[in-house]
Image (spheres, grey):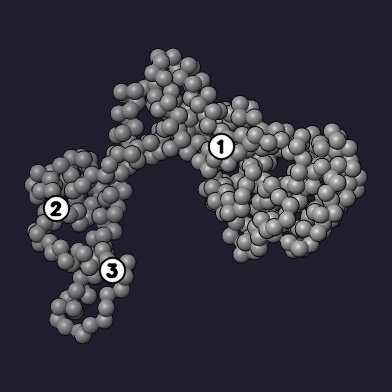
Amino acid sequence: MKIRRFTAPDVRQAIRQVREAMGADAVILSNRSVGGGIEIVAATDYEDTVLEQASCQEAEPLPERRPSSNASRDESQKPILLEMRQEVKNLRNLVEVQLSDLAWGELGRRHPLKAQLLRRLIGLDLVPELCRQLAAQASNSNDPHQIWQQALQVLTDLIPIADDDTLTAGGIVALIGPTGVGKTTSVAKIAARFALRHGIHSVALVTTDCFRIGAQEQLHTYGRILGVPVKVVQDRQALEKILDGLLDRQLVLIDTAGMSQRDMHLTKQFAMLAGGGPKIRNYLVLSAATQSSALDEVVQQFNRVELSGCILTKIDEAASLGGIVSTVIRRQLPLAYISDGQRVPEDFGAARAQHLVHLLTEYACEREKGLADEALAQAFGRAINYAHV
């Protein structure tokens, strides 16, 4: 193995020296910052089999074999090889950051209006993939305001909206979702609005929540205030029997137990709602205050039961709406209603894409001001291919 040391003012120049001096097959052994630049140690004429064993070491264990002098030598080399792999990984990350910064800077120089648009879009807390999609569909106008309005219009058109109106059509509707997202309050709001339109004898409430202490009492309290009956069920057979007895009601709302997307009992709840008998329309209740990564996981798990749409709650508590907007677009989950407060039934209404985008831009004003170039570079510079040394 031939080993050489290179120093340069930055990573790109150091890698160029390695390529020119040792060729494209050179492997980086280590890198560190030194006075005035960076130092890289590279090697050639290494044994491919040794490196392959090191790369496969963590994927699957090697079969047992008799001790030998070669085996002992390989064992002694393992810590060195693992350290080499970590050094290569660190260098890869360093190069990735450098290239991301260069890509973002080059974009700003060549296409300043597009860079400005991407800055404003990422300020909405939308995922980078969606930001790139919106920027690509904007026109090549020289007017920044016109480009911004076009991007917002494209975003508005991408947000899926449910085409059915439970407040008008009625039916059997179940609200499902994680704990604490506001399912019971949403049930009360829908029931109150429907009763105001069609009378209290047109609505009935059902709860399957037999887990949480006080959950049934909360719904019973709403039922007494509204003057509508509240039924409690524990399994699919009881649910079918109750629903058969409520056929004279235009709207039957089912309040389900709040469960984590990782709860083992979730499958049992899905079976209760998806079994035979009357057709139940399921609406997923999501909190706008939930983190974007958790929102995507929730939708993925609850999508195992047929969903008619979703109800977005706690808009007034969210620091940003970019996460929920990105999720419903990515998962193509239609928005039915939004809730922005605890008042029953005032803080509740049909979802409108244009209104949601308006709220999205209002929430993002302060976030956009403090958005650093480093964050933008990391978000949009990762499309650059990794350098191969």
Q: Is residue 338 visible to the viewer in this orientation of the structure?
A: no
Measuring 58% from the left and 35% from the top, which residue is drawn there?
Answer: 160
Measuring 65% from the left and 34% from the top, which residue is drawn there?
Answer: 163
Instruction: In the rendered structure, find residue 184 and report the number of the disc placed on it.
Output: none
Secondary structure beneath label 1? helix
Question: Is label 1 or label 2 in front?
Answer: 1
- The residue wearing badge 1 is 325
Q: Residues within 10 Å of mark 1 (few under 14, many from 20)?
A: many
Residue 194: give x, y in percent of width and height: 82, 37
The picture quadrant where one finds residue 310 is: top right
Going from N to C along the chain, the mark reached first, 3 or 1, is 3
Relative placement, left or right, of 108 versus 213 is left
Instruction: In the rendered structure, find residue 26 and report the number of the disc placed on it.
Output: 2
Going from N to C along the chain, the mark reached first, 1 or 2, is 2
The N terminus lies in quadrant: bottom left
Measuring 39% from the left and 21% from the top, which residue is drawn there?
Answer: 113
Instruction: In the rendered structure, find residue 57 and report the number of the disc placed on it.
Output: 3
Measuring 68% from the left and 58% from the top, which residue is drawn there?
Answer: 275
Residue 40: give x, y in percent of width and height: 19, 50
Q: Check the image and report above or below for 260 versus 119.
A: below
Going from N to C along the chain, the mark reached first, 2 or 3, is 2
Q: Residue furthest bottom?
A: 66
Relative placement, left or right, of 186 versus 298 is right
Distance Cα–Cα, label 1 vs label 2:
46 Å
Secondary structure beneath label 2? loop
